[in-house]
Image (cartoon, grey):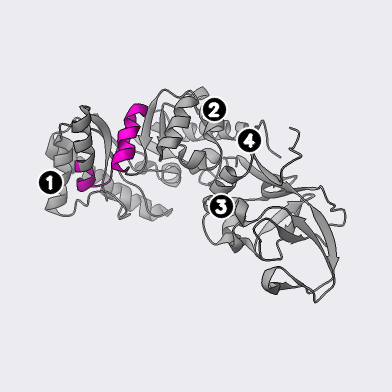
Amino acid sequence: MTPPVSVAGWVEIDESAITHNVRTIRAELGENVEFCAVVKADAYGHGIDIVVPLLVAEGITIIGVASNDDAAVVRRAGFTGRMMRVRPGGRDEIGEGIRFGMEEWIGGAEHARVVSALAEARGVRIRVHLSLNSTQLGRDGIELGETAGRDAAAGVLADPHLEVIGLCSHFPCEDVADVVEGASRFDEETCTVLARSGADASIMRHCATTFAALTVPASRFDLVRIGAGLYGDTDAVGGALRPAMRVVSRIAAINVYRRGSTVGYERWHRLDHDSRLAVIPLGYADGFHRSLSGTGEVLVRGRRAPIVDRIAMNSFLVDVTRIDAAAPGDEVVLFGRQGDEAITSADVEGAHGHIAADLYVAWGRLLPRRAVAAAG
């Protein structure tokens, strides 16, 4: 691939990595578990237009989204299978979601009444997944520890305007013991709900996303919702998955500053040695959060170079003193692999203090993006 010449930075999406990840995860799950591929937030910044055709080619039949905008792009990309919203939707967006064949996520008894009233007004029966608070996430879902909750769940299952096709939950922690406990509670509570209501045995049960699905087989039930794993942002399969994103820029300029000089807004950093500092023409307007100031690294000529100043709106500085050959125009990798080195999700999380997706979802949506056969 010829790199772009007229932009400050860009994102490369390795299509072969996504295909590899789908096949690897499917082999790990086996044949008895449905694979819902989650492409919310424009496929975690990787691009629905890039990712969905790869999923179609691999025979994926269920896709998870959050917004109607993403749903529209999924359909335009050629997907004709089932589509599930993976959060509770508002009344108006649920109404709009009908045209996409959206299966809605019911986030509680009151939410169920809103969806039911909409379905009745439209003269349709909306397919839904009823969320239960079995894993104690406490974000949405009916709490079944009280009689009122059990009655509410039975009421949703009996609602003539809602076709309950799934019972669902979501784990709060990437911790094996927590997942085991939550999955056991989900199993017990869903069995109780289904037996009490006399509901159709074909109702699916699902609570596992990538970490749970790939580390605790008992959490898989009938369907798993795989998001981060599609894009290689997990080590849950012992490093078998491949990161699909590279974020790339070029050195714009290099200057030499004496020891004791200050760099960055508010004289944020004082140099403790004579330094060659390279200007990278990206900043917080491009999703490079100020939390990376003084903590993050980039790759230049296959070597790590630290970010030394306070990240500005459109630029930041890295120290290339020990990279003698570094020159304006050199490729800079801010996320992903260059030669034998890589800036990984773990690196970003250590520097940023939060999950890497908090940043790379933004990078993929703010910077020009292109598919490549193999990044690096």
Query: Is 23 on the left-hand or right-hand side of 175?
Result: right
Task: State the separation of the CA atoms marked 3 and 4.
Answer: 18 Å
Q: Please tell me the numbered disc located at residue 367.
A: none
Res 162 seen here: no
Which stretch did the figure color magenta?
Answer: 89-113
Secondary structure at badge 1 equals helix
Q: Disc 3 vs disc 2: which is toward the camera?
A: 3
Q: Quadrant of the C terminus?
A: top right
**Residue type indicated by callout 4:** Asp
Q: Position of residue 27 (x, y in %)?
A: 48, 31
* Residue drawn where x is 65% and y is 43% of the image: 246
Task: State the separation of the CA atoms marked 3 and 2.
Answer: 24 Å
Secondary structure at badge 2 equals helix
Q: Please tell me the numbered disc located at residue 151.
A: 1
Asked where in the image residue 14 lies, by quadrant, the reply is top right
The residue identified by callout 3 is 359
Q: Crowdedness of circle 2 by 10 Å Cα count: few (<14), some, many (20+)?
A: some
The residue identified by callout 2 is 54
Q: Disc 3 vs disc 1: which is toward the camera?
A: 3
First reached walking from the N terminus: tag 1 or tag 4: 4
Q: Crowdedness of circle 4 by 10 Å Cα count: few (<14), some, many (20+)?
A: many
Q: Main secondary structure of the magenta part?
A: helix
**Residue type indicated by callout 3:** Leu
Query: Is 191 on the left-hand or right-hand side of 23?
Result: left
First reached walking from the N terminus: tag 1 or tag 2: 2
Secondary structure at badge 3 equals helix
